[in-house]
Image (cartoon, grey):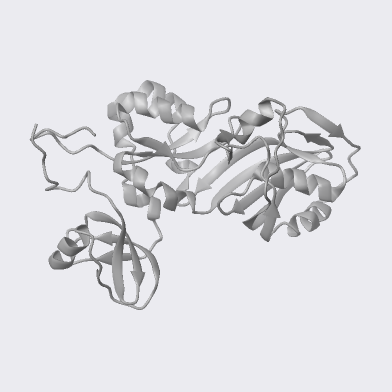
Amino acid sequence: MSRRRRGEPPPRSGILVVDKTPGVTSFDVVAAVRGVLGVRRVGHGGTLDPDAVGVLPILIGEATKLTPYLVDQDKEYVAVVRWGVTTDTHDLSGRVVATAPVPVFTRETVERACAQFRGRITQTPPMYSALHHEGRRLYELAREGLEVERAPRQVVVHAITVEAVSPATATLRIVCGKGTYVRTLAADLGDRLGCGGAVESLQRTRVGPFTLGDAVSAREIRAGGAAALWTRLRPPDAALAGWPAVTLDETDTTAFVHGQAVGATGDGAGFVRVYDGGGRFLGVGECRGGAVRPARMLHADRPGTRELPA
């Protein structure tokens, strides 16, 4: 582990919201940001398919500790689904395995089908996904022509809005929880309508609190340079916007940063943002029984962090 020299400023951390372009992987974006900023600890807040575009939060430095909490938050997508075609990837980049005539669908027909996929539903993850099976990604196996059994799992679809209907497609706005595959949802909708379906285009418009309005483009990453990108970083606690917050006095701050639970007002339970009296973000706490205990601490940007000898 590298050591910070005396007098050297603490490493910066935060969240860069990127508008991912088609044809690149989420890891490609991570690598590009890492290269421009010269920071080793960089991750992303939820994989986007290579052909998909839209919001990809990039977490930098200490902010990477908040990845599990950001990934758990709701996401919003706009998907164009093409009827009458079934592929092995559930989108149009895949191999066509079946075609069928497309009946004349009214908006009401599509809305009735969508209504059956709102709420808590069961999905079988697609073979072309980043899930692991015996140490390998499913998409690696799929590219070798292999198919393995995948356990169905419960996901939550909060809303599906039908925004447009044409003779061959429907445009859907989908708000869903962690682990939902929009490609699988499109295929299941096509099955329900009796003609098959696959994603023609997919844009993620929101991850938790982050929207396209917050995002930088791929061009800005390539051409802007490190100084420009640093100015676009959101603070780490922006990932938790909307969470309740707890502010600690000096005594409780000292105890909290040393791993001790401290008293908290109110009788609520769950995760909270924790700050000291000066407004500095300390990390994630978990409230229970009138106390808040440390769940995930952030250290790098805190003034007064102990300096290690050279």
Q: Position of residue 130 (x, y in %)?
A: 58, 37
Side of 231 relative to 105 (left or right): left
**Quarter of the picture holding the C terminus:** top left
Quadrant in which residue 58 is drawn: top left
Please name whichever residue, 231 or 183, is drawn nearer the observer in this view of the structure: 183
Front residue of 236 and 304: 304
**What percent of the width, then of the height, locates residue 268?**
38, 74
Q: Position of residue 248 (x, y in %)?
A: 21, 66
Q: Relative to 83, is 299 above or below?
A: below
Residue at image x 79%, y 55%? 113
Asked which quadrant contains residue 14, the reply is: top left
**218 relative position to 277: left or right:** right
Number of residue marks: 0
* Residue located at (25% from left, 67% from top): 261
Relative horizontal placement of residue 2, taking residue 267 as reference (left or right) = left
Q: Nearer the viewer, residue 275 or 137?
A: 137
Name the residue furthest top.
223
Determine if residue 171 is in view: no
Above or below residue 146? Residue 80 is below
| Residue 125 visible within the image | yes
Question: Where is residue 108 drawn, in percent x and y?
Answer: 81, 56
Instruction: Tell me which residue sits at (19%, 58%) in the image.
Output: 258
Residue 113 located left or right of residue 131: right
Locate the N terminus by quadrant: top left
